[in-house]
Image (cartoon, rainbow, N blue to C red):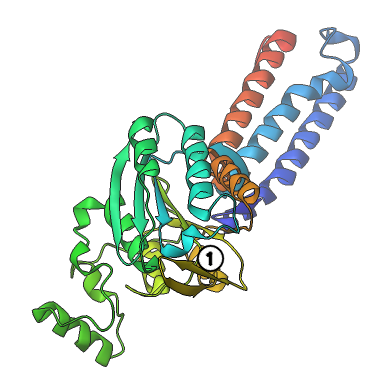
């Protein structure tokens, strides 16, 4: 357990003082009874140690209230409140590889369907695909049929733009921020584009963020990474980013908005050579970048080397997104327990003594 205002716990020093005051009063009262001898009649249940039970409950209630003033927080399991989940799926040519049976893409489609099926019906799910460029192929919707159809339409293409996928996903989550989709997927050697490109070059020259022109000039206020609970991004890739914005710079944008980006790596880190229609290429999983993206945004990285592994990864993600453990302030809980103790103490006191003592 941690405390938001730990300095307020000094108020607990009043508890032993209150206990000592009560004991002093109880002894004086007992002494007065002895001095009066048989002139004082006592109620049966109030005799002996039972008479201390109501005041003890009051003291416990005061202790809990003083602890709650420090605003305690604890790790608790709560239902997730994600309104939107964006699945960003790599459809680069390497997804044709057969090391994950029957192919990486087919295994991904099957696992993605199971993942979508496991989400609450109120959760809106969107699909972003990325190869040389990233595209929103299914806006967030509660219609599972529309999402399944979008997954079934996935086709391999050339290139891998992980950074573009993150930016398009952010634009999907925050449509009112007008994140500039025209620049997404732009390769470093693409021709200049007027004043926007000049601003980009100027930013690079002064050591600024190369992703600066992917968003409007007015940036939203920065928040803690992983603090945005209304939406998450689940990004799956099987290779290295070969075009588009830097994935780390894009992850920084997500972290600044509090959006978590869970990353899934499919395939082997050693890589393999695949061929298709007369061309071949060497593909290798860039785990370092995917881990960094997840860490920066307060999420997790998962590796899937087989179709079964991929299914288990999506099952684990489902459990994390539906029910999650997080640090939550429990001030209200302690205050409620304190109120219950006060009510019990008052009830016993009235029942035994006819008044609150």
Q: Is residue 214 left or right of residue 80?
A: left
Report crowding for label 1: few under 14, some 14 to 19, many 20 or more residues within 10 A (C-alpha). Answer: many
Q: As drawn, which residue projects farthest toward the bottom?
A: 205
- At a point 81% along the width and 13% down the height, the residue shown is 46
Q: Is residue 278 left or right of residue 118?
A: left
In the picture, residue 76 is in which quadrant? top right
Q: Is residue 32 above or below residue 72?
A: above
Instruction: Judge by depth and name the residue closer to the eye, 320 or 86.
Output: 86
Can you give x and y, in whole percent of width and height, for residue 340 in the image? 62, 24
Q: Is residue 78 above or below residue 250?
A: above
Q: As drawn, which residue projects farthest toward the front?
A: 278
Instruction: Judge by depth and name the residue closer to the eye, 14 or 230.
Output: 230
- At a point 26% along the width and 67% down the height, the residue shown is 184
Instruction: Judge by depth and name the residue closer to the eye, 235 or 177.
Output: 235
Can you give x and y, in whole percent of width and height, for residue 311 in the image? 59, 45
Can you give x and y, in whole percent of width and height, for residue 174 in the image? 27, 52
Task: Work out whether residue 185 can be spotted.
Answer: yes
As helix, strand or loop, the secondary structure at mark 1 comes to helix
- At a point 58% along the width and 29% down the height, the residue shown is 336
Q: Which residue is mark 1?
A: 295
In the picture, residue 215 is in which quadrant? bottom left
Q: Is residue 177 left or right of residue 259?
A: left
């Amino acid at each position: 357990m941690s405390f938001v205002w730990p300095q307020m716990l000094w108020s607990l020093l009043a508890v032993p003082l209150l206990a000592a005051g009560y004991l002093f009063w109880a002894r004086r009262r007992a002494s007065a009874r002895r001095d009066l001898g048989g002139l004082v009649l006592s109620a049966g249940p109030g005799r002996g140690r039972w008479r201390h039970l109501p005041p003890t409950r009051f003291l416990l209630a005061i202790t809990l209230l003083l602890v709650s003033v420090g605003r305690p927080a604890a790790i608790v399991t709560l239902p997730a409140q994600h309104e939107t989940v964006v699945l960003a799926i790599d459809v680069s040519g390497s997804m044709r590889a057969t090391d994950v049976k029957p192919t990486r893409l087919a295994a991904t489609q099957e696992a993605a369907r199971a993942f979508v099926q496991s989400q609450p019906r109120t959760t809106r799910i969107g699909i972003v695909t990325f190869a040389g460029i990233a595209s929103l192929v299914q806006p967030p919707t509660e219609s599972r049929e529309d999402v399944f159809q979008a997954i079934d339409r996935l086709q391999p293409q050339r290139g891998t733009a992980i950074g573009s996928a993150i930016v398009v996903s952010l634009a999907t989550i925050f449509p009112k921020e007008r994140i500039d989709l025209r620049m997404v997927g732009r390769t470093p050697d693409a021709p200049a584009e007027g004043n926007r490109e000049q601003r980009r070059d100027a930013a690079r020259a002064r050591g600024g963020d190369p992703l600066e022109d992917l968003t409007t000039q007015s940036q939203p206020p920065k928040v803690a990474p992983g603090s945005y609970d209304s939406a998450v991004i689940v990004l799956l890739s099987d290779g290295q980013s070969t075009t588009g914005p830097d994935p780390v710079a894009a992850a920084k944008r997500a972290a600044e908005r509090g959006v978590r980006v869970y990353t899934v790596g499919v395939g082997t880190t050693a890589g393999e050579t695949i061929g298709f229609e007369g061309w071949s290429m060497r593909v290798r999983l860039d785990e370092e970048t995917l881990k960094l993206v997840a860490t920066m945004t307060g999420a997790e990285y998962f590796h899937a080397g087989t179709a079964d592994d991929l299914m288990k990864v999506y099952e684990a993600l489902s459990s994390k997104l539906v029910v999650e453990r997080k640090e939550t302030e429990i001030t209200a809980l302690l205050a409620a327990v304190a109120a219950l103790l006060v009510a019990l103490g008052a009830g016993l006191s009235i029942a035994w003594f006819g008044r609150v003592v």
